Amino acid sequence: MAIPASKTNVSTTGRTSASVTERANERSLGQIVSDAAANAQSLVRDEIALAKAEINQDVQKGIKTGAGFGIAAVLAAYGFGILLIAAALALALVLPHWAAFLIVAAVLFVFAGIGALFGLSQMKKIKGKPERAIKAADRTQKTLKAAADPNTTTPRS
């Protein structure tokens, strides 16, 4: 039994014509742009979530690293203290105990003074203000002013 051509959506030339339901499924340009914007927003949100997750992992690793270094520093301080006592007791074999401990303390104060002088010299090198950031902000401000006023020239960096 032959089916009439009008019911099969086949034209007399053999091509299939678009059905009514396919035309209804076509989206307008506005819908396509809206979907693209929504997809872009979703992508940005996902990228931000990924960055936060990576940063959180790094922070957790940093906390563990800091704890490990903290424990090492405390143990090293105790070990250094015991080493100083051993040095004082070794000196006490040839000197009175009070003199041996006094010499060890004096050596410690000399090293502490050297460290303080080094720290003071490094502190004087601190400028206290972000000069490069200030210059960049000034350039940006001048550029924005120049863009707002067509009579001025754009500054060059």
Image (cartoon, rainbow, N blue to C red):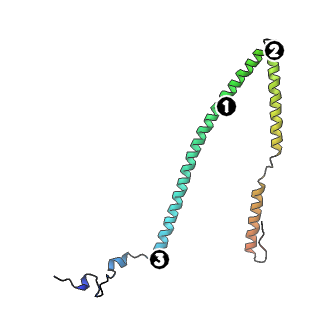
In whole angstroms, how far apart are the C-alphas of marks 1 and 3?
65 Å
State which quarter of the image contains the C terminus.
Answer: bottom right
- Circle 1 residue: 73
Q: Which mark is residue 98?
A: 2
On screen, 16 above or below 77? below
Residue depicted at x 69% and y 27%: 77
Residue depicted at x 48% and y 71%: 34
Snapshot quadrant of residue 135: bottom right
Q: Position of residue 134 (x, y in %)?
A: 77, 58
Residue depicted at x 47% and y 69%: 35
Snapshot quadrant of residue 99: top right
Which amino acid type is marked by label 2? Trp
Which amino acid type is marked by label 1? Ala
* In this picture, residue 18 sits left or right of residue 137: left
Residue depicted at x 51% and y 57%: 46
In whole angstroms, how far apart are the C-alphas of marks 3 and 2?
92 Å
- Circle 3 residue: 29
* In this picture, residue 15 sits left or right of residue 38: left
